[in-house]
Image: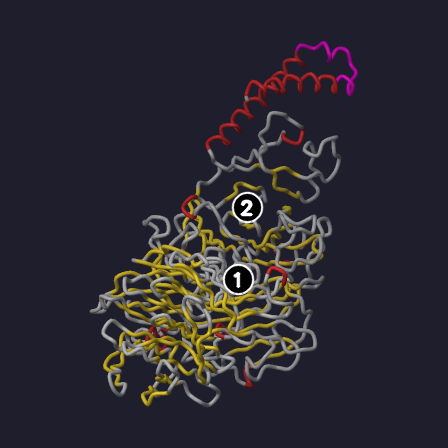
Amino acid sequence: MKNKLLAQLIKLRHKLNQHIKKIFNIRYIQKSKTFKFLLSLIVGIIVTTLGITTDWATTGTRTLIYKTSSINNTIGSENLSLQNNTETPTLTHKKISISNTIASENLQVQNNTGTSTPTYKTSWIGNTIGSGNLRVQNNIEAMYVAPDGTVYTNSHWDEAGMEAAIYKDGKVIGAIGDTHGWSRGGGKAVTVNSKYIYIAMTQGSKGKTNEDYPAEGTTWHCVRRYDLSGKPAPFPEGRGWDKSMLITSTKSEVTGLATVGNELYVSDFAANRIRVYDTDTMKELRSFTLANPGAITIDPQKNLWIIQSKNDSKPAKILHYSPSGKQLPQKIADIVEPTAIAIDHQGKLLVAENGPRQQMLIYDIKDKPVQVGSFGSKGGIYAGVAGEVRDLKLYGLTGVGTDASGNIYINSNGFNKSGTDLRKFSPSGKLMWRSLGLIFVDNADADPKTDGVDLFTKQEHYLMDYSKAAGKQWTYKAYTLNAFKYPQDPRLHTSPDGTFVRRIQGKPFLFLTDMYNSFLQIYRFNPATDGKVAIPAGMFVGTNGDKKSIGGKWPPNQPKLGEWIWRDRNGNGKFENNEYDTSKDYPYIGGWWVDSKGDVWKALRTEDGIRHYPLQGIDAKGNPIYSYSSMEKQTTPKIFNDLRRIEYFPQTDTMYLSGFTVDHPAFGDDTGVAGSEIARFDNWSKGNRTPRWRIVIPYDTTGKREVSTAAMSVAGDYVFAVTVKTAEVYVYNAKTGAQVQQLKPGPEVGSESGWIDIPYGIRAFRRSNGEYLVFVEENWKGKVIMYRLAG
């Protein structure tokens, strides 16, 4: 390859000599030995540089260089430009190109600032498994435990298409396939016999009725049959593209499944019926009436125990039926929210009580049901130190069961689908293994006081030990949402996904925003009263035209028009009438920021689009105080015509903004991206609006969104930006704007990542030892990627 490069360079030398002859047309220069010596020297330098570049490419170390865009006095080539130093430089990214032909676009000018390329390592948090197709799924909403300890699961949605899975001995050993895409989804019921797996699922329309898809506007709620390896098992008269689906309803989903002998029992919630099918032919044998039927289990006498879900004022019950559909006298009514049931190896009934007790209840059902025991700490995750994770503290129970040896299996799913926490216990109650899949559309941030040892996502608190191997550094420390004490917690009613951790006057606070930048939620901590729980403290929302800012019944007492700031004045976590401050503003929000002093910043996508809410103090209940009367309107710098992200640092009076600019406008209106440029402004509070530098970041110029930047984060000496589809992290020098590096997922996470879906899909933190922690959303495989970048 080097010989070919040398040959090309020799040709290039001749061409350059000819061009220079034409330009200068001075004979004594053409004959000058000095000139020829200098030209040879230049070619030699280029050869040496390319040799080094070739070494970089073959050793795998990624080092990117940058080019400056021409502001004035362009000379012939896009890559040979003279900077006009009276203007602000604009830097663009450019990858190294190695090929057998050398064109002018491949001759780059190196950044001669002497900036070294920091080394980095990849790790992750929030999922027991960091790579591969078989990792812990986003949620488990139903499960069945086989006698040999194999656990079969189901859920409505998994980002990577593993709605239903198979676990054994703490490992994911299989996926129950084809539940994702083509308008398919999973469900909340699963059962297994000696031949087949049966799961609840949905099939939506695809406009392909000739291939046996539903008609437009119709959804099939089905039972789908699989063999024990997880492959669809078709049957005569089966429906769907592969004839493995049994349509039970077009009105509501299947809510319970159980088998005994050659019979399959199905809860048809919409019809208020239990339907019975032959497990082999899948033909309906009979049915009987039961209002609001849910999960089903079958006792040793082949009788059914069925959860009757609560309906308005009618509480939930567990009812007893014969196989023929005759209601038997036994029932369990002293229960608040049963979510799952099973029969253990001794014939006792196990009930997942998802009410305030947060326990698995154990009933002797030989005669009249009698509770003979319970499993797990009473009060669940809120027992003892509220929110602190312990082996026997459960939360959001969705599945229970035992194997033939009496080992106990329980899944906690948190509240509002927080994530999978599947545990196996010995008969004596000792934790044997645990599989965690805690992340879904989320990112992490570090507590600045503990130097990155404590990390927070929207609902979880992790403790880090950076001396351990990749993926082993994190310990699940606390679950910060209390659904019983604070039922109006915004996390139960919205879908936040971007996390900022701040220390304000020494006290910890958590700030959360969402995929659409429509709100900013505020949480405080009070260990004396609430342990590890994040207490709802405040909330900002934007203007929503002439409608309420948030549709629906939540939050109570919401102003009918305009935008608002809520502060929990009496400290009870409830949205009360006298706790709202109201205003009205431009409705389209680009981003939010909370600086180190606790001031809130909002970027609106308009000319006077910067809103600054200075912190007015902390009230007697511990809530930060903000108001519209103290809000400052600030003008967007003229270079921007669509402001998207904002990060201000009061210690240095430095502002970083991103968005689309007059020079690099948006192609269409992709509301989720960070824009086309990032700019740094010094002396911001003194009124300076002339950027120190501007950099062009990857952005869409075709409308296909193949290249675009999702988010940015500034920490220490670097500005970090991450792209949407490739999840590549571009690292820029914060002083100069020069690109210094590019980060990609390493082999520790399978060298892969999903798309970046959220405006704050990257958060960066510099530790006291100079190391940088860079957290990147990885929604596809249910984790947060963490890069460790040497300082």
- Asked if labels 2 and 1 touch by Cβ distance under 8 angstroms, the answer is no
Identity, as a three-letter code, of the amino acid under mark 2: Tyr
Check disc 2 and report the residue beneath it.
Answer: 730
Per the image, is 543 magenta?
Answer: no
Q: Which mark is residue 751?
A: none
Q: Could you tell me if residue 400 is visible in this image?
A: yes
Q: Is residue 645 left or right of residue 347?
A: right
Q: Is residue 107 above or below residue 473?
A: above
Question: Residue at point 44% right, 49% down?
Answer: 787
Residue bounds of the magenta highlight: 21-33
SS for dot 1: loop
- Quarter where residue 376 is shown: bottom left
Colouring of the image: secondary structure
Of tags 1 and 2, which is closer to the observer? 2
Question: Residue at point 64% right, 46% down?
Answer: 696
Question: Residue at point 51% right, 61% down?
Answer: 243
Check disc 1 and report the residue beneath it.
Answer: 595
- Name the foreground residue: 425 vs 112: 425
Q: Position of residue 75 (x, y in %)?
A: 74, 31
Q: Is residue 767 above or below residue 574?
A: above
Q: Of helix, strand and loop, which mostly describes the magenta segment?
A: helix
Quadrant for the C terminus, please: top left
Q: Position of residue 73 (x, y in %)?
A: 75, 35
